[in-house]
Amino acid sequence: MTRTAQLSGVLLLALSCLLPGCLNVQRLKNADPYVIHHHNWWNYYQRGRLYVQDEKFQAAQSDFQTALGQIPGARLSYAKESWRARTYGMHLIEGYFPHRELGICLFEQQQFSEALELLEFSIQMEPSARAKFYINQVHAALARASTPPRIEINTLSGWTPQRALSFQGTVEGPNPIVALAINGEQEFIELATSHRPFLRKLALKEGRNVIPIVATDVADNQTTTNLIISADWTPPEIHLHRAGSSLTITCTDNLGLNQLEINERIEYATSNEHTLTHPLIAGEPLHVTASDHAGNRITWSLSKKEIQHLAQPSETGPPRLHVTNADKTITLYNPEYVLDLRADDDTALETVQLNGVNLLTQITPLFRTMRRIPLELGYNRFELMAEDTDGNQTSTEITVRYRQPEYRDRIYRLATALAPLEGEIPDITFKRRVNHLIGHELTLDPVRFNLLADIDETSQLLSEQSLSDSELSDPRALLKQGEKLDADLVFFTRVLSDGAGYTIYTQVLDTRSGDELFVEDVYLEDLHHLPNQLSGLVMKLEQHFPLIQACLQQQDRRLVIDAGAMKGAQKGMRFLVIRSSGTFEQGRVILTENRPVELIISEVESARAQVIVPNGQSKHTAQPGDFVFSR
Amino acid sequence: MKIRYQFVLIGVFCLLLAACDRSEPGGTLPKKTPPTTEALSYHALVIGIGDYTGTGWPQLGTARADAIAMGDVLRTRYSFNVVELTDRQATRGNVLRSLDKLMNLTANDALLIYFAGHGFYDEQMDEGYWIPYGAERTRLEQPAKEDWLWNSSISRVLSALPAKHVLLVADTCYGGSLFRGEKVPDKSYQWYHRAMAVPSRYLITSGNLEPVLDSGIRHSVFAQEILNYLQYADTDVFSASDIAVSIRSNVSQFTGQLVRMGPLASSAHAGGEFVFVRSDSASPFPEAVDADPVEPVFRSTEPEEPLLHLASQIETYSRNAPESSFVRPRILACLGPTGSDPEETTLIRNRLNTSLNSIGGSILVERKAFDSLLQEVELGRSRLADQRATTEIGKLLPASLILFGEIIPFGEQTEIHLRIVDTETSRVLSSASASFKHPDELDGACQTLAEQIMKTMNEARPILLPAHRADNEMLEAGWGNFHGARVGDSFEIITREATDTIAPRETLFGTAQLHSLGEERSVFEAEWNRPEAEPSAKIWLKAIF
């Protein structure tokens, strides 16, 4: 028995025809709205809802109890299903949650313990956002403790060489936690609990990052903890100077130089620039290592020959730049390029520039740096130039193309049609806002669903296609034919006027199989919370479709992928097939007739899943050894 | 092959033929009859039937007055010999008899036939009818076609008429089989002069099944517009197509119908046109007109089939040809945001359009009166299509992207929600929202929205231009004013491999800036990263604005 069935609008309509008036909670004009002409359980349930809307909670309580058979009155024998089916699987009444509604009545009458019991029972039977909302309310009413929540984080404040920080922690307290904001962004919390784990990945800026974590419990007790992270992804730099018969070695770091090691001799830095001297002995190799507090490390080993050269410089020439991939274009699939640069000159380097910015802090004949440079999508050009004190110049450049792997392109994500909002819509503004906000959430990066135009928009698209098809059209601008995407999924969103608030739920249908995949809902009483709640709704929808990467194998003539329920795989999930002679990221999506080849999960185990080739697609398009990635 | 291609390619072929004719005066063009304008005398048969009492057809309030007014203006301003048949006079027999009498005209005559009355169009037979006075609508539960005037019969009469020019003006529907596509050349006095010299059979029709009355005016919209033109034309010489083009937009605006115009599919039509000359004009043509024409004026009268065959060949060639150097423009139709307050909506849309225009890379198109034009699209697919009409209306640009959106007041603030949809795939490429409380925040909100929308659009639909070298420093590519380009627009110079995938391998070779703006092609100043390592593969320009 699924919750989706309870919320089925289609069946609701069918029953509406059979039982005219019974399901309509709207008042009839010129009639006593509370009079019921039949004494079936659903008549009592509907009247109970009407009483709730009118805040007549005692009368509502009686009706819900009658509907549930707790007090005599309703004809219960009518329903031939089991009690459970009648209670939670009735397929008949949209939003049929008798225990929840009874619990809300008791809450409003300040019978908190009984209310909590009923609401929790309701959630146990079938979760609903409205029940969670009222459990939070009950907890708030019951909260007595004034002790604020405790925040524990698994990451200590300190240094990191990473650009992003993943950390997790827990918030605990005597009262359930109702709000958690990390770095200013609110977590979506539907049900307040006393123990709330969290996991967050945040982009850092280089330098000191103060990340506030604010937890609030249902009694409005608040705790703030600041996680302070010093991010440093730039390794130290090394400058070598010849000073008579010795060598001066200067190491600098942008944020926090830690230590230097020269031929196993270690010195700790006390500032971000540290200089030491070392005897210059021809024939003795030199190993210099510098590291900073974040763990970035640079090592420079000079061979005997180089030491010889340093001790007895030959004739002067232009500076030399040593860098891999000089004068080449390289492609990367991650957003960072590590530039490992060494520059030297027979006399001294006056300047070493990266895209016009001087890297040198002092004149030096030998310079070594390693930089981790963030990349923009597309082409990134790095121009390097070195000039010595005699004015000789050398330059080179590297072009780095940062691109996403092909299979990450949003065109391959499931095409999704969003049906207009239906149900008990309070006003047109509400409808328009809900439609736009859901559409907006679905198109935010990273895009999980490939949203298609809605019905009204489609008529306009067809007008443009008609124009393009006609002789009125400028032939230079004709539209392409046959490019329209078919919807893989349809989202039906309905709103249900629930007491003082609204339940908004979205039903996801697979257009190929016609199966209803699942339903998610949110509940709100304050319309200012609409954007946040709809963001949560879309987040819940997206959680059902994790992006899974796996390998395709053959086992007993069956195709399986090495990802199962533990990675979020579910029956009916669709995958792209990717073939690569190199890394997964370099792979190409296999297409047939300009459409991606698909595999669909037919059975799921914990660590693997069986996949099948959909009807109409050649069985030989996917081969063991290929990769797969969620559509 | 679709009809639209046929027309377009027929047009192309006609131009090619015309171009050939320039170098080979003999060419395939027929007749080179000397101008004989001095000898032309003008005649008109005007028919107006408003009284359909007892026939099952509704009465028509303006038809009789339309015909009488038409006769008056032709007689007084253009010295036509006018025969009028109104209401009771316009029986089927009388009309046919009047047409028969016109067989006495000669090659020095020009004849205008005006008909205002009910019409009927039988789609199955592709046949149009005029309904004469007294003709019943149905008989024995069948359309009483035996009482009606068949367009095919009228066409035969018109073909057989010895008059040099025949212009049929019908304030009613007319059969599509009478039409044939044709391109309109640029006109000059020389053009009119030669148009008069070559026989023509021409039709202007309102496209309605009956005259459409404009409220408060005693003539139908179509008739009133023609009368206005004939009364107040600001030139002494003009042609039937000048009238049709001029009245077309007004008629469309008031009635939602498109005026159709074009030559009749008659062997008597040799490519000339019906030219009106004001009777009070002293010397309508400058003397230079008598000089030999330097440009061909008329299109070929070759039968359609060979043209269609050739057009098909051209189309096949263009499909199979390697990548064309022509780049389709990125056309954005702004259909949103919409709102309940018209003043606020107009203000927001104007600001938003300004912001979108300032970013560039797309052409913004209007969609006013779009629906009424599209009503004609279905007809346009049939042979009713009138190439001249579409040319004159100005070819419309189908939008490859549409901006939708809504303005929603919420509490003290106003929310603007926008989204851009790809017309070809129906994907929502991007959506953006912004809100403002005070009007002075509007500009900032619109600019942010426009930037957000265009950024996503550029990722989803980048501008990629195949380019070739004009010289060492310069590249040329098919991107110009027509595409919304501007001087200074920046591009990357790249080569592309694996173009059959959605993520071709690209290599950067430099940057280019639009230097010299052309209509469809422009010249770009290239800055090569490494001049010594220029690409040997095909070069592309990728927009980075």
Image (spheres, coloured by chain):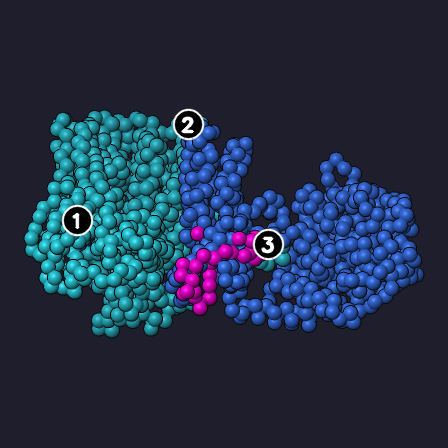
Chain colours: A cyan, B blue
Looking at the image, residue B149 lies above or below residue B52? below
Find disc 2 in the rendering and name its residue.
B412
Horizontal arrangement in the rendering, residue B14 relative to residue A227 (left or right): right
- Say the numbered circle drawn on residue B519: 3
Q: Quadrant of residue B61?
A: top right
Give a yes or no on whether discs 1 and 2 share a subunit: no
Closest to the observer, A457 or B184: B184
Query: What residue is rendered at 41% in x and 28% in y?
Result: B411
In terms of sequence position, does the residue under pointer 2 or pointer 3 come before the other? 2
Image-quadrant location for residue A438: top left
User: How many neighbours does mark 3 have within 10 angstroms: few (below 14), some (14-19), or many (20 or more)?
Assistant: few
Mark 2 belongs to chain: B
Going by the numbered disc 1, the residue's amino acid type is Thr
Which residue is at 46% across, 29% downward? Answer: B440
The stretch in magenta equals B515-544
Determine the secondary structure under disc 3: loop
Q: Is residue B361 above or below residue A96?
A: below
